[in-house]
């Protein structure tokens, strides 16, 4: 097994710990077990190596530090390795990982120097290709105006360069992205250009994104542009997103769906009311329901206010049920109060059931008292069954006590008592287990 893994590692440029971990996971076992075995095997490889044990141990230590995100420690380890073992067979890899660690720290001049040293000393190294790509990225950050995207660059290098240049020079980002979108580059590269344009292009990028959102013939690029508009935070994007969300044919992956998600991401308070308009006036019921879910995920009390407005304005029972479920996603005390009101007084039984299910979803232990009060005052047997299930969502002694009380109460319907036993059977609480054993022994 060790020989097999050693051969695989020597052929592969992936980090050793990560590769071993993948192999061990493929053979079965948990991630924690695989990590422990990977470290053990690396130690055994180091001990059985024909190279200097100290050198291999130092190299493996550096890779472990890198895998754990300890870049400052990795820099010290790999720098010491390069100086202490200049003729070791892994010195080219050590130089690469030294540069990689420097780049992760934002120490680009040091990264560039390490990469130059690697490429000068080891031009035929298996690490030379990766080193060249990393050096292009580093130099793009050091001198954005002095770097361009080679016409013959592959997709990976092109995307890496675009990202580095966009992060370093916002003005040039728009220019490069526009050139890329007009070029014969692959759809993958163009999608990356659209994402970078939305992230780094600033206000100047919005007209280009709007034009693509409305007219782009490539569906993937169009949806990327729509999504990017949501991240710009620009008010000019909102009317376009509203238009697409209301008029487009909705599907899980479609421009209309992308527009809804973009409105969910847009920082403007106006995006909240636009989502509300889509929910109230939209033609597609699935799209309206999905929009309710997205609205319920937006932070802040304005989203709660909009959910209230929609609940009061929309007669459609299915949409209102989604609104009630959405209120269950909110920690707001106002949302909790409205759910309790609906659970108690809504004329439609289905709305009351949805509210009863939604209250425990808030994850607030204080809401249990409300459920218990509702259970004790309710006379409808079907609703009481829903409340029993809601009580079971609270893994607390208070909830367990109520369920055990229901089991013991001879006035409760037999089916409900059985339901309570079934809910209790999922508990690991010693008191509950003792109670169930006592019930069994008493029969």
Image (tube, grey):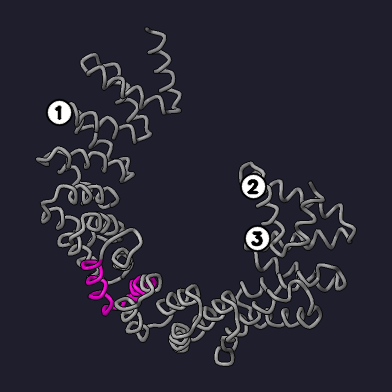
Tally of numbered discs: 3
Q: Considering the numbered disc 3 on the image, is that residue within a helix, a strand or a loop? A: helix
Please tell me the numbered disc located at residue 380: 1
Outermost residue on the bottom side: it is: 146
First in residue order: circle 2 vs circle 3: 2
Alpha carbon distance from label 2 to label 1:
52 Å
Magenta segment: does it hold 231?
A: yes
Q: Residues within 10 Å of mark 2 (few under 14, many from 20)?
A: some
150 horizontally vs 438: left or right: right
> Magenta span covers which residues?
224-248
Residue 18 lies, with reference to residue 166, above or below; the image says above
Alpha carbon distance from label 2 to label 3:
17 Å
Residue at the spot x=28%, y=55% of the render?
A: 293
Closer to us: 217 or 134: 217
The main secondary structure of the magenta stretch is helix
Position of the C terminus, as image quadrant, is top left
Residue 243 x %, y % = 22, 72
First in residue order: circle 2 vs circle 1: 2
Closer to us: 425 or 73: 425
Residue 22 x %, y % = 65, 52
Magenta segment: does it hold 64?
A: no
Q: Considering the numbered disc 1 on the image, is that residue within a helix, a strand or a loop? A: loop
Q: Which residue is mark 2?
A: 25
Residue at the spot x=81%, y=67% of the render?
A: 90
Residue at the spot x=15%, y=47% of the render?
A: 317
Alpha carbon distance from label 3 to label 1:
58 Å
243 horizontally vs 64: left or right: left
Snapshot quadrant of residue 369? top left
Residue at the spot x=21%, y=68% of the render?
A: 247
């Amino acid at each position: 097994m060790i020989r097999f893994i050693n051969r695989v590692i020597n052929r592969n440029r992936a980090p050793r710990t990560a590769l071993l971990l993948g192999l061990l996971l493929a053979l079965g076992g948990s991630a924690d077990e695989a990590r422990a075995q990977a470290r053990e095997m690396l130690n055994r490889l180091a001990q059985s190596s024909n190279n200097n044990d100290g050198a291999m141990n130092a190299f493996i230590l550096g890779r472990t530090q890198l895998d754990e995100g300890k870049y400052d420690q990795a820099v010290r380890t790999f720098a010491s390795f390069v100086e202490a073992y200049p003729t070791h067979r892994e010195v080219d890899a050590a130089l690469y990982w030294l540069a990689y660690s420097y780049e992760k720290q934002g120490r680009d001049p040091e990264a560039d120097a390490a990469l130059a040293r690697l490429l000068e000393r080891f031009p035929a190294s298996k690490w030379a290709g990766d080193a060249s790509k990393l050096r292009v990225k580093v130099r793009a950050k050091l001198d954005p105006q002095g770097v361009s995207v080679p016409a013959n660059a592959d997709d990976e290098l092109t995307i890496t360069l675009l990202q580095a240049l966009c992060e370093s020079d916002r003005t040039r980002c728009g220019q490069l992205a526009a050139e890329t979108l007009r070029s014969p580059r692959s759809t993958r590269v163009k999608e990356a250009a659209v994402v970078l344009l939305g992230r780094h292009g600033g206000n100047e990028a919005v007209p280009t994104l709007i034009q693509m959102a409305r007219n782009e013939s490539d569906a993937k690029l169009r949806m990327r542009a729509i999504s990017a508009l949501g991240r710009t935070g620009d008010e000019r994007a909102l009317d376009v997103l509203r238009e697409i969300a209301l008029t487009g044919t909705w599907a899980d992956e479609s421009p209309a769906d992308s527009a809804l998600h973009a409105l969910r991401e847009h920082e403007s308070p106006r995006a909240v009311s636009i989502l509300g308009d889509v929910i109230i006036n939209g033609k597609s019921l699935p799209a309206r329901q999905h929009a309710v879910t997205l609205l319920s995920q937006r932070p802040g009390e304005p989203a709660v206010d909009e959910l209230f407005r929609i609940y009061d304005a929309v007669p459609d029972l299915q949409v209102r049920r989604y609104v009630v479920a959405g209120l269950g996603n909110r920690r707001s005390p106002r949302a909790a109060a409205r759910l309790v009101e609906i659970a108690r007084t809504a004329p439609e039984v289905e709305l009351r059931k949805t509210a009863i299910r939604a209250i425990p979803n808030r994850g607030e232990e204080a809401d249990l008292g409300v459920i218990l009060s509702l259970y004790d005052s309710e006379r409808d047997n079907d609703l009481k069954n829903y409340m029993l299930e809601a009580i079971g969502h609270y893994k607390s002694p208070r909830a367990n006590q109520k369920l055990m009380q229901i089991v013991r109460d001879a006035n409760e319907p037999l089916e409900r008592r059985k339901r309570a036993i079934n809910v209790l059977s999922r508990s690991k609480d010693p008191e509950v287990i003792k109670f169930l054993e006592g019930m069994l022994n008493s029969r």
